[in-house]
Image (cartoon, rainbow, N blue to C red):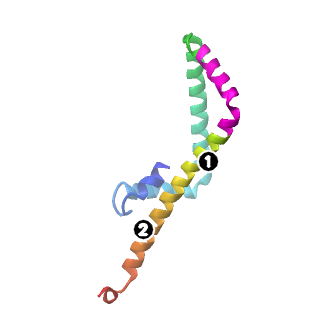
Amino acid sequence: MTAVFVRNLQPQQYEPAHSAQRLVMWYSGRVWTLWLLLLAWRFAVLVTRSIALLRSWHDDAELRPTARSTLAAIRAHTATLLVAVPTVAAAGVLAIVALHFSRTDRLAHVQRAQARPAWTSL
């Protein structure tokens, strides 16, 4: 995902956008490697964070009652959380879509300006 972001920062004839584009093209030709990488990365994070959480759970005596009180508060406000969490997620997705549209619109405007003959701007 970083490579996809970096390749859009500047024209692709310049570094690091050129290298990022090569990386994206390499993965686009080998889709299974991308899926393997993404799944393995998520699995590694799940395992390492679970181990860290279990260590903290056993070592920190204050964590256990705090976690129980947090879970009790979540149970007490389940309906509110079931509305709030998707609402915040939708706001984040909407912001990403708006940024994408604004970038796409700017690129289309630049391309139209470059395609216009010079005598039309007189």
Q: Position of residue 35 (x, y in %)?
A: 61, 47
Magenta span has 78? yes
Residue at 48% from the left image edge and 58% from the top image edge: 99
Compared with residue 45, is residue 67 higher up or lower down, i.e. above or below? Answer: above
For residue 37, side relative to residue 75 (left or right): left
Establish if 112 lies above or below 69: below
| 107 magenta-colored | no
Q: Where is residue 44 shown, x and y percent of the image?
A: 58, 33
Q: Nearer the viewer, mark 2 or mark 1?
A: 2
* Earlier sequence position, callout 2 versus callout 1: 1
Residue 60 shown left or right of residue 74 in the figure:
left
The CA distance from mark 2 to mark 1 is 32 Å
The relative height of residue 103 versus residue 16 in the rendered view (above or below) is below
Q: Residue furthest left?
A: 122
The residue where tag 2 is placed is 106
Q: Which residue is mark 1?
A: 35
**In the rendering, at what x and y percent does residue 24 appear?**
50, 56
Question: On screen, 120 above or below 20?
Answer: below
Depth check, front residue: 109 or 73 = 73
Amino acid bearing label 1: Trp
- Return the x and y of residue 88 as percentages of the image width and height: 58, 44
Q: Residue at x 42, y 59 (%)?
A: 8
Q: Which segment is the magenta one?
A: 65-82
Between residues 108 and 18, which one lies in front from this camera angle?
Answer: 108
Please tell me whether mark 1 sits on a helix, a strand or a loop: helix
Q: Quadrant of residue 118?
A: bottom left
Give the crowd class for mark 2: few <14, some 14-19, many >=20 residues within 10 Å: few
Quarter of the C terminus within the rendering:
bottom left
Q: Residue at x 47, y 66 (%)?
A: 104
Q: Amino acid at mark 2?
A: Arg
Q: Quadrant of residue 73?
A: top right
Magenta region, mostly helix, strand or loop?
helix
